[in-house]
């Protein structure tokens, strides 16, 4: 519970500090900066302007981030990586066959079939051990 309170306090402090910072200028126009009215007005105006600008920026950022997050699953762009496999035909020729793999934006294979119509790759199966005979081989020099 203490760590949650500390994290929340840190976030609130950081947010408050970021909310109250901003750009300001000290151009007082044609009035004297030594009179309290214009000085107070400029200070309050700067504070309100900075706060309103940061609130508006936060709102725009939140909306754009939400929109980008919601649009990501509907992105029709995809990236294909082509591998070439060597296969031997029935008549003994060796040929190169393309095999396409769809990858995500980080280059990791996507767990779905590629839109190019390639068949699913065959599963890796180990060959069974050779069959053994149950009758012993005849001894050398004897005939059957």
Image (cartoon, helix red, strand yellow):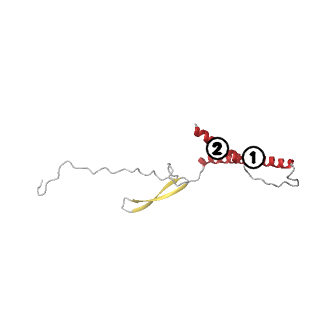
Most extreme residue toward the front is 34
User: In the image, what residue occupies the spot 58% across and 38% down?
Assistant: 2
Q: Position of residue 74 (x, y in %)?
A: 60, 48
In the depicted view, which residue is nearer to us: 137 or 23?
23
User: In the image, what residue occupies the spot 49% across and 56% down?
Assistant: 100
Q: Residues within 10 Å of mark 1 (few under 14, many from 20)?
A: some
Mark drawn on residue 39? none
Instruction: Look at discs 1 and 2 and give the one toward the viewer.
Output: 2
Compute the Cα span from label 1 to label 2. 17 Å
User: In the image, what residue occupies the spot 62% across and 47% down?
Assistant: 69
Task: Identify the residue position indicated by label 2 in the image.
Answer: 11
Q: Secondary structure at mark 1?
A: helix
Q: Position of residue 49 (x, y in %)?
A: 78, 48
User: In the image, what residue occupies the spot 64% across and 48% down?
Assistant: 68
Q: Is residue 11 left or right of residue 84?
A: right
In the depicted view, which residue is nearer to us: 127 or 41?
41
Task: Identify the residue position indicated by label 1 in the image.
Answer: 51
């Amino acid at each position: 519970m203490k760590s949650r309170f500390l994290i929340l306090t840190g976030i609130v402090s950081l947010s408050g500090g970021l909310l109250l910072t901003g750009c300001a200028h000290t151009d007082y126009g044609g009035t004297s900066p030594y009179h309290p009215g214009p000085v107070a007005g400029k200070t309050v105006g700067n504070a309100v302007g900075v706060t309103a600008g940061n609130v508006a920026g936060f709102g725009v950022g939140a909306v754009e981030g939400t929109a980008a997050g919601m649009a990501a699953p509907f992105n029709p762009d995809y990236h294909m990586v082509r591998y070439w496999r060597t296969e031997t035909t029935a008549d003994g020729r060796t040929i190169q066959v393309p095999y396409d793999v769809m990858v995500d934006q980080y280059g990791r294979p996507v767990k779905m079939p590629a839109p190019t119509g390639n068949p699913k790759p065959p599963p890796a199966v180990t060959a069974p051990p050779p069959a053994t005979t149950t009758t012993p081989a005849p001894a050398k020099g004897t005939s059957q």
